[in-house]
Image (cartoon, rainbow, N blue to C red):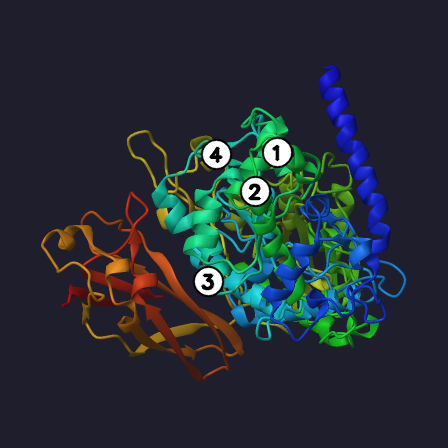
Amino acid sequence: MAKTSAFSFLLIAFVLVFLARTAESRRPFACDPSNDMTKSLPFCTVSLHIRDRVRDLIGRLTLQEKIGLLVNNAAPVPRLGILGYEWWSEALHGVSNVGPGTKFGGEFPGATSFPQVITTAASFNDSLWERIGQVVSDEGRAMYNGGKAGLTFWSPNVNIFRDPRWGRGQETPGEDPVVAARYGARYVKGLQSAQGDRLKVAACCKHYTAYDLDNWNHVDRFHFNAQVSKQDLEDTYNVPFKACVREGNVASVMCSYNQVNGVPTCADPNLLKNTIRGAWRLDGYIVSDCDSVGVLYEKQHYTATPEDAAAATIKAGLDLDCGPYLAVFTEGAIKQGKLSEADVNTALLNTLTVQMRLGMFDGPRQPYANLGPRDVCTPDHQQLALEAARQGIVLLKNQKTSPPLSTRLHPTVAVIGPNSDVTVTMIGNYAGVACDYTTPVQGIARYVHTIHEAGCSDVACNSNQQFGAAEEAARRADATVLVMGLDQSIEAEGRDRVSLLLPGHQQELISRVALASKGPAILVLMSGGPVDIDFAKADPRISAIIWAGYPGEEGGTAIADVLFGMTNPGGKLPMTWYPESYLAQVPMTNMDMRANPSNGYPGRTYRFYKGPVIYPFGHGLSYTTFVHKLASSPPSAISVPFAANKFMKNSTMLTTGLKVTHANCNALTLGIHIDVHNTGTMDGTHTVLAFATPPAGKWTKDKQLIGFEKVHVVAGAGQRVKMHIDVCKHLSVADEFGVRRIPIGDHTLHVGDLKHSVSLQLGI
């Protein structure tokens, strides 16, 4: 016990020293040209190649100085004019004050708070995702220039939303790997806004890998050992991270707390050195989730000593520790012969290169030095937040009696529910200080007179004593809007859900108010995860159901615009909505994606689960109607050519499929053109979802998303959507060994009700 207490005291003391240092890390630039000690040194010479500058800098550092740079609150090196730097800033859906790198106040009282990621994912609009990233990085760079933020933002979260209970599912782009991959790549591109090898800010894709459990049934993320098949790693869990690196050229990847098949991810050389940096060719740094290095020793007991933990992680490919462990124990690991100074140099090469790419050693000669307070919370940025909320709202049910509501027919609206007048609830977690808020009741009040009753004091809704006033409001009004759902007290980091039902007496409130309502009753749900609302779906008194996710600072305006028809909803669910009964069949600790009929395991996500659902992945209605027509389709048969010097075709490939690495993928792109016609009376946006099914036989029969495009179509008109299908990427499947293969035979493409068969045949 004494040993443990002394160890804890050492860590606390170290952290306090580092926190004291960070006061001087707020100044934005290193290599000040007025500093005679450093202005002529090669690492401050902008005309030299960045790698040469980094190597020069590393060569001037002592071992102790190097070790001080291995942690998130990196120590200053005064003799070289190097300032302290805090690496930990967040920008999940706006500049956040989570983490010590960002502080609001003074000239920067707030920043634009966009909808939570799960909501913008529902837009299925990757150009929107990139534009949001560009705005967030403008504001982040402006705050950096003002000494209020760093330039290394540990966002986005691209983990697969595998289980509906996960408290952090709200941070993700949903359950589909294709969507998560495109979201990650486009948001990263927007954030980094790379110009050559220079970055506006540095993004980070997290949490690698198979991380999607926080605290369930006495199992927490710090102790969880995720048992994951090679097949599921390849075709589900790793897909978005691979896209972040290869397509988004992300500057960083964060390894997670959990173990994967018995090895902590931050100490697994196969996951880090061999895969991220080797196979995927990461040009950047790998950072631990905060205190992960300490966790693998103290909680997982993976190593015998703290020095072993430092050595194992650095040698596995970790470059930066969010936490104090590497600063405290790396020198001991070197003295004990478990690590070399060359290993430390490799880590610093990766982190310092990113800082050089950001211009942090260029003095005041910055490409974004003009950004400042006037570039934060601009009208254009707040308008984009509103547009993102509008695009992410999903119309789940509409009986055609309403909405949209009418200011003429519904001049008085009862607005009821614990989420009807909320502010911070709308921005979800990993948010900052919003520029401003428009709550749902405020948004509706811009259209009509409102009667407001909360019904419940909060989303827990532990009492029904206020229900009578809510029912009376519904009787007096021409229409009723119930704004219900969840908040961070129900789903959050460290808090997985125990039920998919609405909390407390919410269901009772909804049913009683709908029964009492003189006019149409509309249910609006705020939540990050899915909710079992089968009762409302079946209730004819509830004319419409809208899911708003967590819609950001302008959420109230967006909700009202949809309710009154100023916006035609076009969002689609990025995750399956399951019934409550699903939870009894599926423990959160089971990482298998595919169903197992032998033990009754039903599988996960729309790709592998075939049981009953409340609403399926991709569901979303509109106030208008759309029809598809195949305008141009791929040929019915395509030859799959071999890459040079690969095996000749043989009969086993007909059943095992051709390895992607053995195919000439450059020659395997298909085009499909779809005409989308708006056959209704209102302009609207429509998302075209394209799925594929592999040949019958040993391959799964499940449809899997291969592409999506969003298109705006005016009433009575049409638009042509062109989709390009990469055979090696989109029509391949992962076998049980995690090897990607192209199944030979008839593949079926699905777009809405349209089907088209493409036969892939072995070529020479």
Q: What number is the disc on residue 333?
A: 1
Disc nearer the start of the sequence (3/2): 3
Q: CA distance from mark 2 to mark 1?
A: 11 Å
* Distance CA(mark 4)–CA(mark 3): 25 Å
**Camera-nearest label, 1 or 4:** 1
| Pointer 4 residue | 263
Q: Amino acid at mark 3?
A: Arg
- Image: 258 above or below 148: above
Residue 81, image quadrant = bottom right
| Residue 215 shows up from this direction | no
Q: Secondary structure at mark 2?
A: helix
Q: Dividing the picture into quarters, in which one does residue 198 lie? A: bottom right
For disc 3, the marked residue is 246
Q: Earlier in the sequence, mark 1 or mark 4?
A: 4
Q: Earlier in the sequence, mark 4 or mark 3?
A: 3
Q: Which residue is mark 2?
A: 314
CB atoms of marks 1 and 3 within 8 Å: no
Residue sitting at x 60%, y 30%: 336
Mark 4 near mark 3, Cβ–Cβ under 8 Å? no
* Residue 191 as seen in the image, left or right of residue 419: left
> Residues under labels 2 and 4: Cα distance?
14 Å
- The amino acid type found where label 2 is placed reads Ile
Q: Are marks 2 and 4 in contact (CB under 8 Å)?
A: no
Q: Secondary structure at mark 3?
A: helix
Q: The residue under label 1 is which amino acid type?
A: Ala
Front of the two marks 3 and 2: 2
